[in-house]
Image: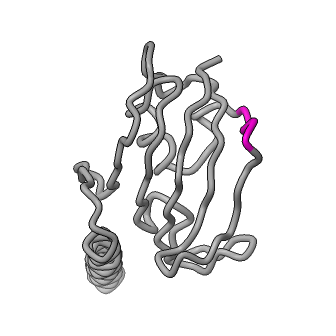
C-alpha cells in the first residue's frame, strides 16, 4: 500500500512538472510572437494573451452566451489551420476551447482583436484535425454579435 502511495505521489509530481514546462514553453512562444510582431497584449492569470483592436459596442458576452464570430486561426509561424467566412459562425461559449471561453468575453459586439492561446487552453497534449499536440493557437477575432 505504501509503495502505491509513493508511486502515486511521484506520478503526480512528474505530471505537474511536465505541465509547468509546457506552460513556460508556450509562454515563451507567445511572448516571442508578440515581440516579433510589435503587439501590445494583455496576459491573464491563466496564461491567455488578448489584444483588443476595436472594443465594439454593447454588453460583453457571458461565459454561457451564444455568439457569432468571424475568425482566422493560425500557428505562431503564421500558417493557418482554420477560418470562417466573413459572416462568422454561431456557437455557445460552453462548447469551445477554454481559450475562447475566457477570451471572447473580453470583446463587445463589433469588437476585433486577437487571442494568443497556450496549449493548455486549446487542445493540450491531444492532436486534432491538423493541429499538433501542445500547439499555441492564435486567432484573429471579430465578435459579430451576442445572440
Q: Please say which color scheme the image uses.
A: one colour
Reply above or below: 68 against 3.
above
Residue 19 percent coordinates (x, y): 34, 74
The image shows residue 131, relative to residue 103, as above or below, that is below
Q: Is residue 87 magenta?
A: yes
Q: Compared to 7, does 141 lie above or below?
A: above
Tally the numbered discs.
0
Q: Residue at x 31, y 86 (%)?
A: 3
**Between 94 and 3, which is closer to the camera in this rendering?**
94
Q: Judge from the rendering whether residue 45 lies leftward or rightward of residue 62; answer left or right.
A: left
**Whether residue 9 is visible:** no
Image quadrant holding the N terminus, namely bottom left
For the point 34% across and 74% down, which residue is it? 33
Q: Residue at x 35, y 49 (%)?
A: 50
Q: Nearer the viewer, residue 8 or 34?
A: 34
Q: Main secondary structure of the magenta part?
A: loop
Question: Which quadrant holds the C terminus?
Answer: top right
In the picture, residue 126 is in which quadrant? bottom right
**Magenta segment range?**
86-90
Q: Give x and y (percent) for residue 138.
A: 49, 63
Residue 24, percent across and down?
26, 77
Lateral position of residue 22 relative to residue 94, left or right: left
Q: Residue 118: horizontal and vertical position, in percent? A: 40, 65
Residue 144 seen in render: yes
Is 16 in the magenta? Answer: no
Q: Residue furthest top?
A: 58
Horizontal arrangement in the rendering, residue 97 relative to residue 63 (left or right): right
Amino acid at each position: 500500500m505504501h509503495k502505491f502511495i509513493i508511486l502515486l505521489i511521484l506520478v503526480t509530481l512528474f505530471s505537474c512538472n511536465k505541465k509547468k514546462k509546457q506552460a513556460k514553453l508556450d509562454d515563451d512562444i507567445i511572448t516571442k510572437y508578440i515581440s516579433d510582431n510589435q503587439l501590445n497584449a494583455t496576459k491573464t492569470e491563466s496564461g491567455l494573451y488578448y489584444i483588443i483592436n476595436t472594443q465594439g459596442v454593447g454588453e460583453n458576452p457571458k461565459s454561457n452566451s451564444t455568439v457569432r464570430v468571424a475568425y482566422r486561426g493560425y500557428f505562431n509561424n503564421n500558417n493557418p489551420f482554420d477560418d470562417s467566412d466573413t459572416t462568422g459562425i454561431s456557437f455557445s461559449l460552453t462548447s469551445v476551447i477554454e481559450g475562447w471561453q475566457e477570451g471572447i468575453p473580453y470583446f463587445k459586439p463589433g469588437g476585433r482583436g486577437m487571442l494568443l492561446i497556450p496549449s493548455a487552453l486549446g487542445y493540450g497534449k491531444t492532436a486534432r484535425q491538423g493541429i499538433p499536440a501542445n500547439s499555441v493557437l492564435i486567432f484573429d477575432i471579430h465578435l459579430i454579435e451576442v445572440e
